[in-house]
Image (cartoon, grey):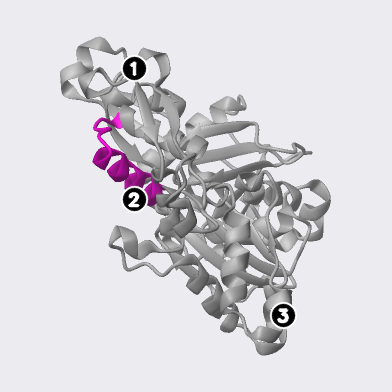
Amino acid sequence: MEHSLVLDMGSYTTKAGYSNGKKPEHLIPSLVGNIRSKFVDKFSKDTYVGQEALETIEYLSLRKVIDHGYIHNFDDYELLLQNVFSKFGLESLNDTCILFSEPILSPSNTRHKIIEIAFETFDANTLNISPATLLAIYGIGEITGTVIEIGDGITQCVPVIEGYVEKQSVRRNDFGGAEISRYLQKLLALAGFQFSTRKESTFVYDIKEKLCFCSLNPSKDEVRTDLKAEYVLPDGYTLADDIDTVFIETERFYAPEVIFNPVIMDTECPNIVSIVWDSIQACPVHQRMALTSKIILSGGSTKFENFPQRLQVELKNVAPQGARDIVKVNAIEEREFLPWMGGAYFASETMRQANINAWITSEEWAESGITIIQKFAQI
């Protein structure tokens, strides 16, 4: 068991790889679907998982295995795990240490079930479950800072002090990239481009990732004449009315603007600046300077162009006059992988041995069963 297997399972993708890698080896859509009844005669099997599910999406009754951080169907979860393990040629985990990330404030019964599945179904040798935000701070080699993670389904703000989560200051909202994509889809529809099918929704995600950006000055960008961009639908695909090219202008920054002004899409979610500032202010006074000076971005939905700069400006605007120069937002290039990278560090042989009490062995599971969950109580 020289290297551990690290899984960062998100609402959009599951990132998987061994702990000796610099990046996850596999990015697997967190999807499961069954062939719809009118198409059953065209397919050799009923259930499709991961990348296969994405490739046959228009024929499926599709389900997200993880929806806004929650697992509602553990049969689907097992299918996704089987798909992941097959990528590594693993039929059993009896010789494998495995680390799972999880969203902060996850239900305890979800953690119980994950542990049970790992040991009972997949015969895991050794296991750890850690908050994705805590792993993210490990991923940049730090132990103190404020982690902001915006994924496809969740926004999390988690202050970490000397390697421990400041629990009473944690803030979480079930809002993320999926909501931004839906808003972009609505804006495109108003512009005359109807994305109606499951497959067409995947194009909206692609448009968002390739063409959208955060505005540093929305009122100025509103009147710019150089924003027009085009997106050619892949593989000769056409929308209704034989449209094969989508033109997008102010929508490019309107969609990500909901992170800072969620009211424009009629949601009561607080904006990201309020979330972060409220979280830091809930921490002990003597820790706030350190937490304000090291704000760490994580997750794919923080990767919009200009997002780090916009967030830093907005946070400085709400900070007291004397504290504005302290505000510092840190954003590494591959921050969508940050929890996985931190997991790889924490699951390395050296760190595993140094933190042996953070891991559950199959022997402990056999002896204590689910009561062993108390071992994670300090996280």
| Residue at the extreme left | 38
Please provide percent x and percent y for residue 267. Answer: 31, 63
Q: Which residue is mark 1?
A: 237
Q: Secondary structure at mark 3?
A: helix
Q: Position of residue 349 (x, y in %)?
A: 80, 47
According to the picture, the residue beneath numbered tag 3 turns out to be 289
Between discs 3 and 1, the one toward the N terminus = 1
Magenta region: 178-198
Give amino acid for label 3.
Met
Q: Alpha-carbon neighbours of circle 1 within 10 Å: few (<14), some, or many (≥20)?
A: few
Q: Looking at the rendered structure, which numbered label has been put on residue 72?
A: 2
**Structural distance between the alpha carbons of marks 1 and 2:** 33 Å
Q: Residue at x 75, y 55 (%)?
A: 140
Left or right position of 354 against 211: right
Is residue 233 rendered to the left or right of residue 97? left
How many numbered dots are placed on residues in this image? 3
The residues tagged by marks 3 and 1 sit, at their Cα atoms, a distance apart of 52 Å
State which quarter of the image contains the N terminus.
Answer: top right
- Seen at 48% across and 56% down, the residue is 220
The image position of residue 35, as x and y in percent, is 26, 24
Nearer-N-terminus badge (2/3): 2
